[in-house]
Image (tube, rainbow, N blue to C red):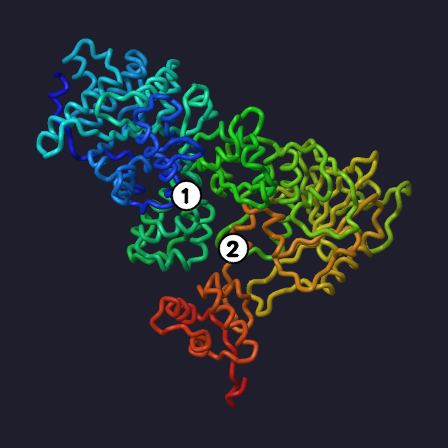
Amino acid sequence: MWIKQFPPCDKKRKLVTSVGKDFEFRGRDNTFKILWEGKNDLNGIRGRFEDIKNNNKNAHPIPFLAGGPGTGKSRFLDELERLTKEHVNKDEKIRKTFKNMTFLNVTYGNESPPTSLDIRIGCEASLAFRILFDYFQPEGFNFRDFINSCKSSNKNINNLTLDSALKTIYTDFTERVIQNSSAEKQEILILIVGIDEFNKLYKINENFMDLITCISGIMCEPPAGIFFVPVLSGTIEGPIEDYIKSSLYKRLHLPLPLLENDDTIEIFGKAIRNEEFVRRNHHFRLCICDIGGHVKTLEYFYRFFVDRLEQLGNGNPYQVQVSEIIQSVKHRIIFDYNSNRYAIYLESTLAKAILGLPVQKNEKVNEQFNESYEDLDHAGILKLVQCKEEHYQIRIPYILVCLFVKQSGSNDLVFWKEMLIYEETMWWQSFEEFNARFWALRLHLFRLAGYSIVNLKELLRGAEFSRGLPDIEVILPETAIRLYRLKHQYPKKHQYPKKGDAPELCQLEENEDMNVTQNDFINIERLDEQYIEKYTDSVFINGPGAMFDVFSIHKINNINKTLIVIQQVKKTDPRAENSMIINNNRFNFEFNKVSEAMKNVSTDEWIFLFLTDASAKDLTIKCKNNSAFVGKEQFESFFGYTYSSRAQFACEPSEIHISSAPIEILNKYLGLDKKQCKILSVKRAHSKICDLEDMREMVGIGKNSKRFKVLKEFDEQKRLVFDMKNNNGEY
């Protein structure tokens, strides 16, 4: 036989050859479990084997990995041999039956991309050649050389079928393996074949569906002595229906969700052999949140991180500027992945993710995209987090959001900005600007999510409302919102004229040449109450010393009526010894101040929106008029996961005051567990803590423990502040 000129190679070819091949394989237990056990009345490997004599196609669904780019499809195929053998060895019933297993991974990428040759010889021969090539792996031959050699040996090679290729493998297996053992020649061969980049063949060959029919047929009635397990893998570049759903064959969809952050941290920590650093370094952990469990992005991050370590020459990961690394990663992802199709499909999904709007698992993404949100979760493009019994919120990694927005071109995403910088604390001034931008973005996102008119409570979703919040509908802007920065206070402290009075000289400067645009905000002198309707769908940062910080003007669903949304913005100071708390007195003070100022403004409706990252204590706003509140407890629900997990909102404090720091700080930065935090919280209320040794004894931390090493390093950096004694030894 012509194929015998190629002796089989025992060394298996890996699909993944980059640095990611050495990462610890985590977060895919459920994927393999579904492949092995099946799901929803669909057989997995085990069920198919038990039904091996049943040639009904419904008993043999086609396993299929369909994921977004860079989600770890190829790596999963590389790990199939190890995972299967580990699973088989745990099951005595099948260990003997599955002792003869051969694993192959063929690909339509890397060194064997589909070409015109694949069209000429047909889809079935195309796959059959690749299977034989991976099985024999002839030394010194690439895939094209292999095919040319085969053609010169057999003129009818174009007629090669999948069935004959599998028979060839079985013949070689029995001759070379079984004859050298005590096994009987008729023992079954378990042949598991990963077929990677399957979507690329689909792109060039209109007879692709014939191959699906062929594969399913072989699964139902394989050659004698073979149990055939194909695992198809492809990147979603359109509806999955175009791959298999349109056929009459069942498919077993294998999910490849985004990795959990804990898995990502474990992988990276072991890769750089410094698990302490990855668990303690605040900015690094924020990068991990940005990566969001996207496998290829993690690989890029690792590569750039290690390169920087080598440049430093001292191996100290704390000297690596992770903010620079993540920017390099973002640019690489944008360069590598042409995701225009995703961006178009996912515009409304992006809006819902940023706004935190709930969706149902089986809900279709949009009318043009037949996939459900659950399909995209399984594909590793987003993550669904349950928020109600049948509703989920969408999580998309920040770095992927940047990618999709970059390639979207939608006017409704014009206010998406990377407003948050890793190494820079967000002070109240930048928090003002952020909230002005976010409000403009929020209005556009609701339109992108399908709204033209939105109820006020829905617009303020995530905030806490007063009972007196107006029941009105806001008309969303059809054009881009304008951002302004006032140089003078609005309203002025003296009484303003009412509508219809003679205009004053303080009207908004309309000569564009005199306005200066700075950081997307147009700097203007002042705003005149009389002409306020002209500036609907605009957001203003108020002048210095004004009674409120940010405001915007909107049309409401009532002829010729307007709404002003007043934002009072308060940002905590991470250097403060005592954390800011918002109670009734603080809220009432700000509300009354705004109420007094609004007496000088002629508008149909106005609301007071208090925005802060501080916690509320004993605060009740239910009985207030037209009020809404967003504090620390409402932060994620209002701003959404995408923004609330970012650096400025969780900036690492330069000093931690042991006697007053919140439990969250003690847990997050010092690594104290819940029990230790509780002990410290109770005891410090009655006892002073003058140094690290006092703290260690109070909490019960061992001197040789890893946790004490963390505390000691913080103390040596003079970042722990204790109760001080005077010269007489008194506090």
Q: Secondary structure at mark 2?
A: loop
3 is higher (above) or lower (below) than 523: above
**Residue at left 10%, top 34%?**
181
Residue type at mark 2 is: Glu
Q: Within 10 Å of the Cα at label 2, are there few (<14), some (14-19), or many (20+) other Cα atoms?
A: few
Residue type at mark 1 is: Ser
The x, y position of residue 408, in whole percent, is: 53, 31
Q: Nearer the viewer, residue 713 or 138?
A: 138
Q: Within 10 Å of the Cα at label 1, are there few (<14), some (14-19), or many (20+) other Cα atoms?
A: some
642 is higher (above) or lower (below) than 662: above
Residue at the extreme left:
180
State the mark number for residue 328. 1
| Quadrant of res 715 | bottom left
Q: Secondary structure at mark 1?
A: helix
**Residue at left 35%, top 20%?**
201
Q: Nearer the viewer, residue 172 or 462?
A: 172
Quadrant placement of the N terminus: top left
The x, y position of residue 331, in whole percent, is: 43, 39
State the mark number for residue 424. 2
State the mark number for residue 452. none
501 is higher (above) or lower (below) than 190: below
Q: From this viewpoint, is residue 609 visible?
A: no
Q: Nearer the viewer, residue 137 or 693?
A: 137
The x, y position of residue 374, in whole percent, is: 50, 35
What's the distance in space between the residues labelled 2 and 1, CA to CA?
A: 18 Å
